[in-house]
Image: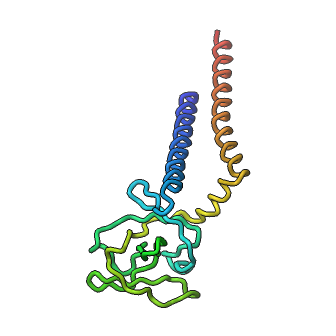
Amino acid sequence: MLKTIIKIFEKILFGLFIILIIIFGYYIIQRVTNKDKPAKMFGYYLYEVSSWSMYNEESEHSLSKGDLIFVKKLKDDEYQVGMVVTYDTGNNIPTTHMIIDRSGNTITTQGINKEGNTSSDAPFDVSKIIGEVQGVYRNYRSHMNLITSPLGIILVLGIGFIIIEGTTIINKKLNKNNDNKELKEE
């Protein structure tokens, strides 16, 4: 029974490891081949936050420079005051700010950093919105810097090796215990 559970656990871990490698590889290929466009995975655009304009530790919408945000396109009439959206500014660098006013199809946004520029952005048409921020991977840039460093690569490969070898050793130990148990019963 324990042997079966270990084998299932081993297959699940190995499968998750492979899925993560595929997703990570797909993301890297998209970033390399489409440098001017955001990566798109599972219906979400992925952007790295490049400024501190949305940092406010008192707000649930706070974003730090280096976070990775997941942005999903909504219908134009779904964007409302209070939503954090990413929009096209026309200079290949999208902006992510909170909607503070909506009049028809005209949107006004503003960053939430109290120590920075507190003035609102120039109003723009709702069609410029790329999407609403629906998820955040905090400290993405620091994690990527670690993973892509020589030490990080060694750590990732080492952890994968330890997981695979560890489950193999446990499996062999269980087989040996079962063999010894069968010999004693004879």
Instruction: In the rendered view, tell whether residue 26 sits above or below residue 73.
Output: above
Q: On the picture, is 44 further left or further right than 11?
A: left
Q: Nearer the viewer, residue 151 or 173?
A: 151
Name which quarter of the figure residue 76 lies in. Answer: bottom left
**Where does residue 150 sit, x and y in percent of width and height?**
72, 51
Q: On the picture, is 51 further left or further right than 105?
A: right
Name which quarter of the figure residue 145 lies in. Answer: bottom right
Q: Nearer the viewer, residue 126 or 113?
A: 126
* Extreme-right residue of the structure: 151
Picture colour scheme: rainbow
Residue at 45% across, 84% down: 110
Instruction: In the rendered view, tell whether residue 21 sits above or below residue 95.
Output: above
Q: Nearer the viewer, residue 39 or 116?
A: 39
Q: On the picture, is 34 further left or further right than 154?
A: left
**Where does residue 176 sit, x and y in percent of width and height?**
68, 21
Name which quarter of the figure residue 45 lies in. Answer: bottom left
Residue at 46% across, 62% down: 37
Residue at 38% across, 57% down: 43
**Where does residue 75 sit, x and y in percent of width and height?**
28, 69
**Where does residue 157 sit, x and y in percent of width and height?**
67, 43
Instruction: In the rendered view, tell whether residue 181 sits above or below residue 137.
Output: above
Instruction: In the rendered view, tell whether residue 184 sits above or below residue 4.
Output: above
